[in-house]
């Protein structure tokens, strides 16, 4: 589902954030990406949804898209196959919960009737059907993250990418969000999640890819967090 061979990312200021990443992530896997601040986790993840372009690489394929060759006009097609969740939710403040989720379907031209049915379905899945008319500012952090997860999966992506999804949430709420992400993974969606949360990584065991100085330094099935921040 995700294949990288020797992928390098240098930023314009000459920082080499990622220096030759080679990794394969199969359909249906759940992968944690861990490592110290500044090690390249966000860059690794941003390369997967074309938020950043690779400087060089032998291969960079995600959900059937060749990201070394993809044209800008084709990036929206990639984004249908790759849903993204952020630490700070990034909801649209002037749109309601319903509108925030529906928007992701409107921009790809889905029919209003299909949109209504699917939006209610995903809001039910994340437990927020009763909040459709509410604005993000009226929700708790955990509820806002649920809306952002609903938005990320509304177009049934093959891959769900999450960059520190529990970074702004208390421990109990973090566990609830993790249970939701695990449920989505259980339905077949490949999950890649960058995190600093040792408790989560050590209790909800999945593959762990550790990054340090722009390189993969550890890759273990059912691994542990295993380093000091
Ligand atoms: P995190 O991955 O912890 O959410 P960021 O990706 O925002 O944080 O930033 C990680 C590191 O990258 C920080 O050290 C930050 O200063 C640096 N950084 C982020 N954006 C830029 C930029 N545009 N120019 C230089 N450094 C940046
Ligand atoms: P992490 O997510 O592990 O904190 P990042 O991928 O954000 O790491 O950052 C890796 C390195 O790249 C850091 O040295 C950071 O300062 C640098 N960096 C990140 N984003 C940018 C950017 N937009 N411009 C320049 N340097 C950046």
Image (cartoon, rainbow, N blue to C red):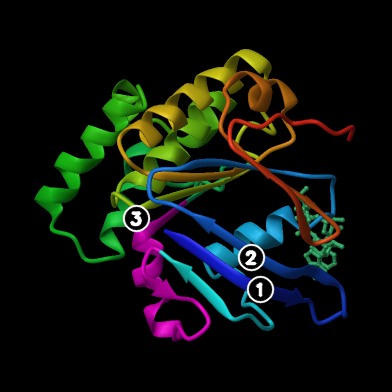
**Magenta part of the protein: which range?**
63-83
Q: Classify 10 Å Cα crowding around label 3: few (below 14), some (14-19), many (20 and above).
A: many
Task: Locate residue 100 relative to residue 32 in the image: left or right.
Answer: left
Label 1 vs label 3: CA separation? 29 Å
Which label sits in the foreground, 2 or 3? 2
User: SS of the residue at dot 1?
Assistant: strand
Residue 88 appears left or right of 196: left
Does the magenta run of residues contain 71? yes
Q: Where is residue 112 in the image (x, y as percent from the top left)?
A: 14, 53
Q: Which residue reaches farthest left?
A: 113
Residue 110 vertical position relative to residue 182 in the rendered view, above or below: below
Residue 5: x %, y % from top left: 60, 72
Q: Mark 2 points at which residue?
A: 22
Look at the numbered discs 1 and 2 and tell me whether their residues touch, using CB distance below 8 Å. Answer: yes
Q: Foreground mark, 1 or 3? A: 1
Q: Report if residue 88 is visible in the image.
A: no
| Residue 130 seen from this side | yes
Outermost residue to the top: 172
Read off the residue under disc 3: 104
Q: N-terminal of the two: label 1 or label 2?
A: 1
Residue 179 as seen in the image, left or right of residue 173: left
Residue 115 in percent (x, y) is at 19, 49
Which quadrant would the N terminus be assigned to in this image? bottom left
């Amino acid at each position: 589902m995700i294949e990288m061979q020797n992928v390098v990312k240098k930023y314009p200021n000459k920082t080499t954030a990622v220096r030759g990443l080679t990794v394969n992530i199969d359909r249906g896997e759940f992968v944690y990406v861990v490592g110290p601040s500044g090690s390249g986790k966000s860059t690794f993840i941003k390369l997967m949804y074309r938020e950043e372009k690779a400087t060089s690489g032998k291969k960079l394929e995600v959900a059937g898209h060749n990201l070394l060759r993809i044209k800008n006009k084709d990036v929206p097609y990639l984004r249908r196959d790759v849903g993204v969740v952020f630490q700070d939710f990034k909801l649209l403040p002037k749109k309601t919960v319903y509108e925030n989720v529906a928007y992701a379907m409107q921009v790809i031209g889905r029919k209003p009737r299909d949109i209504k049915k699917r939006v209610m379905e995903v809001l039910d899945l994340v437990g927020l059907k009763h909040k459709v008319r509410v604005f993000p500012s009226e929700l708790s952090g955990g509820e806002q993250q649920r809306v952002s997860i609903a938005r990320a999966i509304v177009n049934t992506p093959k891959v769900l990418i999450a960059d520190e999804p529990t970074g702004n949430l208390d421990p109990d709420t973090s566990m609830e969000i993790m249970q939701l992400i695990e449920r989505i993974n259980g339905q077949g969606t490949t999950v890649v999640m960058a995190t600093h949360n040792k408790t989560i990584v050590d209790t909800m065991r999945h593959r762990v890819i550790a990054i340090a100085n722009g390189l993969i330094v550890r890759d273990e099935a059912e691994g542990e967090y295993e380093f000091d921040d």
